[in-house]
Amino acid sequence: MIRSEILKEIAPILRNELVVCNIGIPSQELHAIDDQPSNFYMLGTMGLASSIGLGLALAQPKPVIVIDGDGSILTNLGTLPTIGNNAPGNYILMIIDNGSYGSTGDQPTYTSQRTDLAGMARAAGCARVVEVQDKDTGPALEEALASGEATVLVVKCDSGNAKMPVITMDPVVIRDRFMKAVAG
Amino acid sequence: MNIDKRIADDLAANGVSFVTTVPCKQLAGVIEEIDQRDDIFHIPSNKEDEGMGLCAGAWMGGKRPAIIMQNTAIGVTINTLATLIQYYRMPLPMLISYRGELREPVACQVEMAVHTKALLAQLNIPAYHFHWQKDVEEFDNILKYTFMCNKPVAILTDANFWGGYGDQ
């Protein structure tokens, strides 16, 4: 499976939760598959989805699901110790690990070679780290939500992107409706 | 006057309850003060752009955030300031140690100091320079201004403000 197929499958789970979605094609895919006010789409700033989601989870009690990528985690590796030492039970970091920089032309990342993100998350202090294959994402995500524990979920899948339109919504609109969903 | 306590008190009085820090020797006292307080949650960051991500999330979650960092971090965070904090129009007080200014002992720090105000000006980020200890009296107004306009705002605090750098 590629990322967009996973997102289609888990859309009914994501719909009811606060979602912080990674820059580029992941946000375009989620936006096209199931746009919700409770989705925060990143339009720039590669690497910070996990940090934004962590700040949000620490500030309020609702569950927060971050949809991140292997390339973005590698860009902001300092995030893993911060998560490992601070993440509350309402924080789920789902790393769609397709071993490539999808938004820039599918250049390989180091996770397609020797680098193991689940192992790095554990070494950084993350207590609940789960690695699954693409087809098992839905049940693993529901388990993470039910666990009430901070979870890093590494989803191994194929490289590839669906052709989706660019998000043209104004960033302040994205942010404003998201904040209303958070407070609602 | 205990300047570290004064700054932390002003943050708390303005409802700032989520502070992330990347350390600097000049900021050690204020970081320690914030870490000890019950009314402010302190989360250290490994890098300043990561810290700004934390602040963005905390703000969307209903908390007033602030970041404490060194001016070298302006070089690290330009993209984050432009495409996250400014693009989504978020407030962010940035208490910054202004290394490389008067009474600085480390020559390399001057190399970023000479760019600091120019970079902030290029980004249209309001910037205040605290040089004398009494300048801290503006801090409360700067915090109110930041959360009024939903912008990143820089407070540059040099070695003279902190009473010198070590034995300099």
Image (tube, helix red, strand yellow):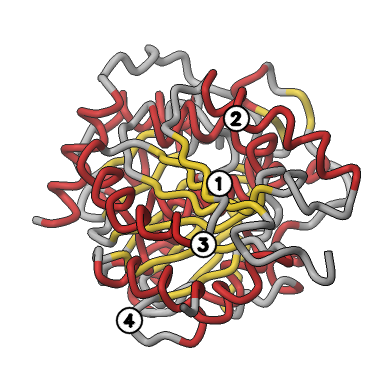
The amino acid at mark 1 is Leu
Chain of the residue under the numbered disc 2 shown in the image: B
Chain of the residue under the numbered disc 4 shown in the image: B
Chain of the residue under the numbered disc 3 shown in the image: B
Disc 1 + disc 4, Cβ < 8 Å: no
Is B80 or B33 nearer to us in this picture?
A: B33
Q: Is residue A133 visible?
A: no
CA gap between label 1 and label 3 equals 12 Å
Task: Check if mark 3 and mark 4 are on a common chain.
Answer: yes
- Res B63 label: none
- Say what secondary structure mark 4 lies in: loop
Q: Residue at x 47, y 27 (%)?
A: B83
Q: Position of residue B128 (x, y in %)?
A: 46, 41
The amino acid at mark 2 is Lys
- Res B39 label: 4
Residue A96's image quarter?
top right
Q: Nearer the viewer, mark 1 or mark 4?
A: 1
Instruction: Residue under label 3, please give it.
Output: B133
Q: Position of residue A122 (x, y in %)?
A: 70, 73
Instruction: Residue under label 2, please give it.
Output: B117
Task: Check if mark 2 and mark 4 are on a common chain.
Answer: yes
Please tell me which of labels 3 and 4 falls first in the chain: 4
Is A130 or B55 nearer to us in this picture?
A: B55
The amino acid at mark 4 is Asp
Q: Residue at x 45, y 54 (%)?
A: B135
Instruction: Residue under label 1, please give it.
Output: B156
CA gap between label 2 and label 4 equals 32 Å
Q: In the figure, is residue A69 to the left or right of B102?
A: left
- Determine crowd level at label 4: few under 14, some 14-19, many 20+ residues with C-alpha closer than 10 A: some
Please tell me which of labels 2 and 1 falls first in the chain: 2
